[in-house]
Amino acid sequence: MPSGIRIKRIEDRIRQDLSELLIREVNDPRLHQIFVTDVKVDRELAFADVYVSAVEGASRSAEILTGLESAAGFLRRILAARVELRAFPKLRFHWDPTPENADHIEKILAGLRDKK
């Protein structure tokens, strides 16, 4: 089993390479203007949970996750060629509400500052 530091490096590499793939090589219109917020790899390197968000917010989440699931095999194959691992983990995609939550909190704080 890899150490925690090695897993963190693998997660960072997958996030960086997947972000570049989504920008440069994926032509699916469902996957435009999305970004990878986080990647978590389990200790056995069997699964990589990829968290994504979009500029438009959660309104397109179902469409984006469907597009990513259909492109999962292609993305995994390209990533496996770029990231040197004996067996590349299967990609599982999840919607990350953190950017929308942060925006909502910022609006609340701005409203409180305006009331003073």
Image (tube, grey):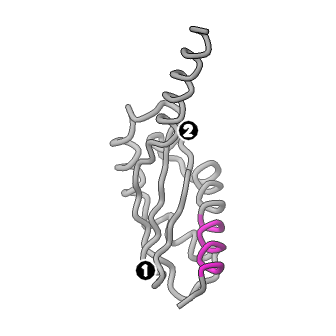
Residue occupying image coordinates x 56% and y 23%: 109
Tell whether position 47 is magenta: no
Left or right: residue 26 compared with residue 9? left
Query: Magenta residues?
Result: 4-14
Above-or-below relation of 12 to 107: below
User: Does the residue at mark 2 contact the one at mark 1 (Cβ under 8 Å)?
Assistant: no
* Circle 1 Cα neighbour tier, 10 Å, few/some/many (<14 / 14–19 / ≥20): few
Q: Which residue is mark 1?
A: 46
* Circle 2 Cα neighbour tier, 10 Å, few/some/many (<14 / 14–19 / ≥20): few
Of helix, strand and loop, which one carries label 1?
loop
Which three-letter amino acid code belongs to the residue tagged 1? Ala
Residue occupying image coordinates x 50% and y 39%: 54
Above-or-below relation of 21 to 84: above
Left or right: residue 109 compared with residue 92? right
In percent of width and height, residue 88 lies at 51, 79
User: Which residue ends up furthest to the top in the rendered image?
Assistant: 115
Query: Residue 8 is drawn in which quadrant?
Result: bottom right
Which three-letter amino acid code belongs to the residue tagged 2? Gln
Above-or-below relation of 115 to 30: above
In percent of width and height, residue 98 lies at 49, 43
In this rendered view, identify the residue nearer to me: 102 or 17.
Answer: 102
Q: Which secondary structure dominates the residues rendered in magenta?
A: helix
* Residue 33 tag number: 2
Above-or-below relation of 80 to 98: below
In percent of width and height, residue 105 lies at 51, 29
> Where does the C terminus fall, quadrant-wise?
top right
Query: Residue 9 is drawn in which quadrant?
Result: bottom right
